[in-house]
Amino acid sequence: MKKIVIGASIVLLAVACSPKASPSATAATIPEASAISSDATTVSAGQTIFTTKCTKCHKAKTEVVASKSYEDLRPILAAMVKKAKLSNDEIQQVSSYVYANSKK
Ligand code: HEC
C-alpha cells in the first residue's frame, strides 16, 4: 500500500512539474496575444478588475505589468486569475488590460 501511495505521489509530482503542463494550461485559460481584444470597453472593464479583484492580496501590480512582455505575463496571469476566481469574460477583459499595458 505504501508503495502505491509513493508511486502515485511521484506521478503527481512529475505531472505538476512537467514543463509541458504549464504552457498548455496557460493557453487554455489566458488568450494568446493574437486573440486579444483591444476594444476600449473591454480594456476599461479589465482595468476595473485589475484595480478591484486583483488587489485583494496585493496592490495593483502595474509596474510588474509594464516591465514584462505579455508572453512573460501569461503564465503569471494564469495563476492569478485562478486566485481571483475570475469568470471567462473577466479573464478576457483583464487580459486585454494587461496586454495593453505590458512591455512592447
Ligand atoms: C488570493 C490572492 C491573490 C489574488 C486574488 C491575486 N494575486 Fe497576484 N499575487 C499573489 C501573491 C501571493 C503573489 C506573490 C507575492 C507578491 O508579489 O505580492 C502575487 C503576485 C502577482 C504578480 C507578480 C508576479 C511576479 O512574478 O512578479 C502579478 C503581476 C500579479 N500577482 C497579478 C495579479 C492579477 C492581474 C490578479 C487578478 C487577476 C491577481 N494578481 C490576483 C496573490 C494574489
Image (spheres, rainbow, N blue to C red):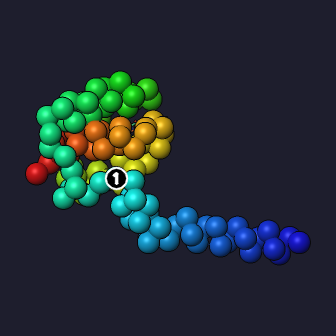
Place of residue 58 in the rendered image (x, y in percent of width and height, measured from the top left): 39, 29
Is there any visible trace of residue 103 in the rendered image?
yes
- Which corner quadrant of the figure contains ligand 1? top left
Q: Looking at the image, how many numbered discs can be counted on the residues?
A: 1
Place of residue 19 in the rendered image (x, y in percent of width and height, measured from the top left): 44, 70
Looking at the image, residue 13 sits to the left or right of residue 70; the answer is: right
* Rendered residue at 41%/66% (across/down): 24
What crowding class fits label 1: few (fewer than 14 Cα within 10 Å), some (14-19), or many (20 or more)?
many
Is there any visible trace of residue 60 in the rendered image?
no
From the viewer's side, name the closer residue of 97 and 76.
97
The secondary element bearing badge 1 is classed as loop
Q: Is mark 1 within 8 Å of ligand 1?
A: no
Residue 10, placed above or below residue 96: below
Looking at the image, residue 5 sits to the left or right of residue 28; the answer is: right
Quarter where residue 1 is shown: bottom right
Residue extending farthest to the left is: 104
Quarter where residue 75 is shown: bottom left
Q: Identify which amino acid the numbered label 1 is placed on.
A: Ile
Place of residue 101 in the rendered image (x, y in percent of width and height, measured from the top left): 16, 40
Quarter where residue 38 is shown: top left
Q: Which residue is mark 1?
A: 30
* Rendered residue at 28%/26% (across/down): 48
Looking at the image, residue 83 sits to the left or right of residue 96; the answer is: right
* Rendered residue at 44%/72% (across/down): 20
* Rendered residue at 28%/39% (across/down): 93
Residue 11, placed above or below residue 78: below
